Amino acid sequence: MPEITIREAISRGLREALEDENVFIMGEDVGSYGGAYAVTKGFLQKYGPERIKDTPIAESVMAGAGVGAAMGGMKPIVEIMTINFMLLAMDQVVNHAAKMRYMSNGQIEVPLIVRTVTGGGGQLGATHSQSFEGWFASVPGLKVAVPSTPYDALGLLRSAVAERDPVIFAEHALLYGVKGEVPDEHYEVPFGQAKVRQEGKDITLVGHLRMVGVAMKVAEALAKKGREAEVIDLRSLRPLDVDTVIESVKKTNRIVVLDENWQTGSFAAEIVSAVQEHAFDYLDGPVGRVGGLDVPAPYSRGLEAAVAPTPERVLDTIKELYGL
Amino acid sequence: MPQMGYDMQQGTLVRWLKSEGASVKKGEPIAEIETDKAVVEFQSYADGVLRKILVKEGTTVAVGKAIAIVGTAGEAIPDAPAEPAAKAEVPQPKPTRSEEVIAAERQPKPVPPSAEPAEPRGDLKVSPIARKLADEMGVDLSRIEGTGPGGRITKDDVLAAAEQPKAAPPKAAAPAPTPAARDIGPGEKVPLTKMRQQIARVTVRSKRESPHFYVSAEIDMSQAMRLRAQLNQSDEFAGTKVTVNDLVIKASVDALQKYPKFNSSFADDAIQMHEAVNIGVAMALEQGLMVPAIMDCAGKSLKEIAAASKDLAERAKGGTLRAEEYTGGTFAISNLGMFDVFSFIAIIHPPQSAVLAVGSVAKRPVVRNDQLAVAETMIATLSADHRVVDGAEGAMFLGEVKRMLENPFTLLL
């Protein structure tokens, strides 16, 4: 099976989508620059400026135009350069895209895809290093995809293209170069199906995007202590596959949820809550979570690394909560 | 609502046999009450008039609740708060001469049913899964030292404890770890009948609460069997066939009068002696085991015991036992002689302190005058509650039973 990067996988998914005349892409630097993360490189030349539209620096306009185009029967794929800029598009996404179907009694649908880049770790400073995908996942009417592998990136993007409701497609800034096998044959990864990346019987580690990799490192460290961790990649935050997490906890009796966002109010808290609601009697200790420290992301490389959840912090938490 | 069986917690009033205003005599059946085991006639505790019925037919109420008021005609009766709760035993000045019909006042007091062994688990920190596993595997959490953060007992601690062979004397004879029955393989699941549930409760409680010890003796029954044959052929015993069990009952009654500690109940801070000698007789009925008692055996002759025993068995089969016969036993005899059993050991029927288990009477080799001989013998095994009596006393009691059966004329005195 050919190995490709997440960047290539998304690029391939977009090209597939563009075979449909109703699909067009718009965003900052998606055209002549080829995309801030080079995902749409060469697209302008191939598909022309009608379908690959560079926009001004105006996220509310981009999102609003996307909502309108989607309502009018198009399939817009709007690229918001980073999730930090989504704050400017929030009203369009939360109050319009997510609400139209409901408020029109199902007469209007908004099949909009908003691709955006989340996460820190790139020394981009406090205003460019945040992880808001969990915020959007709390909004009914939206779907939120969070791929951590090339296979999932392509599979989820295909599902997003087929979806008739607005999708926030959150890509992680540091994962574009991650390689993985992707079959030539067509497949899709449906929303709401978490993936067990590694099976284990001693503790469940849950994460999405970059935290899956951190969890895998934690699992390696635990393996050296003779403990088997089960690593679950959520793959989509809304709909959320709670069942896979609960089933795992019933087996391992221990769980730590990882989230790159600030710990206070992070999406991890939602998982923690679901676990104690549905698997209380199976727990061997408190439900654990490790989030980003509650500070604006530092610019300094060392400090920034210390703010995000690290394998060391996760291991400390596991020891503290479960004595493993 | 009378207590008509150890562990009975409620009863259903099936039918009133008397209506309000009817005059009743002490001992006269006035109602039928259904327990877990059977429908039983309930007899008035007093002479008088059934003034007020407090519990309607078909209603199930807790043991100890007043079900009716018996008084004199015309006497003022209290505005019956339909449930003068189970306070019957609190001595209160009674406003009238009415007697509340509450069975719990009579009968040897059963050990309070709440006597669950107190588990010293107050401050134990236990994870939810550890507690669940401990319950399932029968692991006593109070024996485990938690190794989790803050001393919490974790899953691993319970699993480790379950693997260890039980430490020498476990604090509170914890039930052995029972692997879940479903792990053995497929098979039908038969729901427990009420009687099965009752037997399970009573026997588990007995084995958990009363430390049993056992004393066995071989009893030469040759003379007793001859006597029995003669009696059964005599005119005096016409219509009253004496069974081996009747002989054992009679011998036990006499031995109990000599060693009254075996006719008692352990009552936490005291030993409750019982004046009456009521011999429970274990009976295997279709629905299961029952141990109704022959009441007031102390003054009864062998013939009277034989008659009472036959009557009891018939009424047990017919389901017309009286309440006190369920609860009143002070000692019990379990006889599997008819099944060609050499010997066996019985479980004490709480709140009694002892039970005598007898096997078959059969011809066996014995030594007489240093010579082998053949005699009809029976192995009797006494199970006794060590909280009440000790081994030597058990031996003396059993010796007395043996002496009487081997010199059976004493049974006719």
Image (cartoon, rainbow, N blue to C red):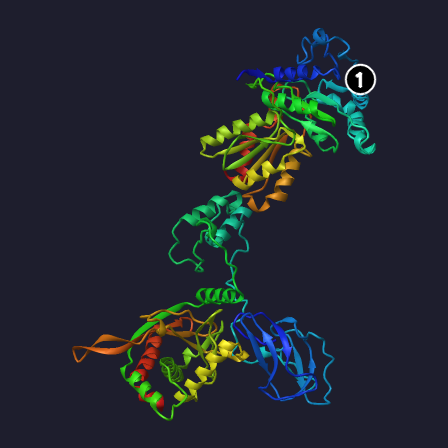
- Residue B10 at x, y = what percent? 60, 70
Q: Write down the quadrant of residue A95 in the picture.
A: top right
Please name the residue shown 43% across and 60% down the image.
Answer: B173
Q: Is residue B93 visible?
A: no
In-front residue for pair B260/B186:
B186
Report the residue that reaches farthest toward the top: A45
In-front residue for pair A49/A265:
A49
- Residue A268 at x, y = what percent? 64, 34
Report the residue that reaches farthest toward the right: A104
Circle 1 residue: A58
At mark 1, the secondary structure is loop
Q: Is residue B242 above or below residue B285?
A: below
- Residue B365 at x, y = what percent? 22, 74
Please name the residue shown 45% across and 58% down the image.
Answer: B175
In-front residue for pair B59/A315:
B59
Q: Is residue A109 visible?
A: yes
Report the residue that reaches farthest toward the bottom: B235
- Taking the image as shown, residue B317 lies to the left or right of residue B390, namely right
Quick one: label 1, few (<14), some, or many (20+) residues within 10 Å? some
Q: Which amino acid type is marked by label 1?
A: Ala
Q: Is residue B390 above or below residue B94?
A: above
- Taking the image as shown, residue B223 lies to the left or right of residue A263, namely left
- Residue A154 at x, y = what percent? 62, 20
What is the chain letter for disc 1? Answer: A
In-front residue for pair B348/B288:
B288
